[in-house]
Image (cartoon, rainbow, N blue to C red):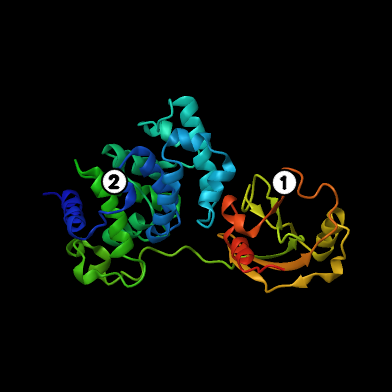
Amino acid sequence: MSATEDFASRLLAWFDVSGRHDLPWQHPRAPYRVWLSEIMLQQTQVRVVVPYFKRFVAVLPDVPALAAAPLDDVLALWSGLGYYARARNLHAAARLCVERHDGDLPRDFDALTALPGIGRSTAGAILAQAWGDRFAIMDGNVKRVLCRYHGIAGWPGLPAIEKQLWTLAETQLPQDRLADYTQAQMDFGATLCTRHDPACVICPLQGGCFALREGRVAELPTPKPGKPLPERKAIVLLLRDDEGRVLLQRRPPAGIWASLWSLPEAEAAESARSWFETHFLDDYDGAEALDPIAHGFTHYHLQLQPLRLRVTRPRSSVGDNDDLRWLALAELSTLGIPAPIRSLLERQTPF
């Protein structure tokens, strides 16, 4: 048995005993369910994804149902899962599948990668798991295992390092059981060959692992060169009327929290006051400052300062257009709302 065959056979043997076999998208491994799970699992742990996945497929069980749903409904189902561009891309891709592929997810690598939100690794994961086709994947878990096993130094995000890892991943593919092998790689990196404190003493690959042999497990993979993240501050207005409803504003179609419903937001105190006085005749100076909200994104840290006001004198346009809407607190689940804003609203009590 060659070294590459030994890698796959040992990993599959480990998976048969210790892998995850009861995930909802495995029963059945239908293309739509595999696709949805792969998108949800990007940047998100399995334990977090499972309840979202179950709720999503219960409402939108297939590609045509997803394509026909309003974006607001899709974002509401996604709300709290984060990285909302994934949901928008999922929705757009479903509509293209209806337009181009008779409502099915295509069994073709190029056709898959032509859809929004599906890159090389996601396409490979769909083809391998849904149809058993011989394609490699390259998520963070796979990168970690390959770097340690083969002794690949250098940050895996660099194009030259990533190209090397793709070559290794494709070389190690087994001839069959591609669906199990794909899941095995993800499970192995997530539960055994973890970033911190990997369980090397029980690792089925320890006999051929460069990092273990050379005492470099903690060094590999090479971390991304660090740099301090910038910070941004903003003001959000928590405005409630006599009925206890809160005023929400749809965010722009691009950028952070795109197309979600959030609180009206301003970069500075002056612009917050200006926005308020454009929409209300109430006294802005009565605003109550609530505890600040800190939220981290990939590229910066955000600090929001909520100001709470009770409003009784809205101008006629408030809540009467596509971008502003009054919503009862009991109706929060009907819209896609950023998680920190939803948490803030759920803490509010009736006036």
Q: Please tell me whether mark 1 sits on a helix, a strand or a loop.
A: loop
- Amino acid type, residue under disc 2 in the picture: His
Residue 27's label in the rendered image is 2
Q: Nearer the viewer, residue 226 or 123?
A: 123
In percent of width and height, residue 275 lies at 82, 56
In percent of width and height, residue 123 lies at 38, 40
Q: Nearer the viewer, residue 70 or 206?
A: 70
In percent of width and height, residue 263 lies at 70, 58
The answer to which image quadrant residue 110 occupies is top left
Q: Earlier in the sequence, mark 1 or mark 2?
A: 2
Q: Residue at x 88, y 58 (%)?
A: 281
CA separation, marks 1 and 2?
40 Å
Question: Can residue 158 be seen here?
Answer: yes
The answer to which image quadrant residue 285 occupies is bottom right
Residue with the mark numbered 1: 323
Q: Residue at x 39, y 31 (%)?
A: 106
Q: Residue at x 74, y 61 (%)?
A: 240
Task: Please say if 128 is above or below 6.
Answer: above
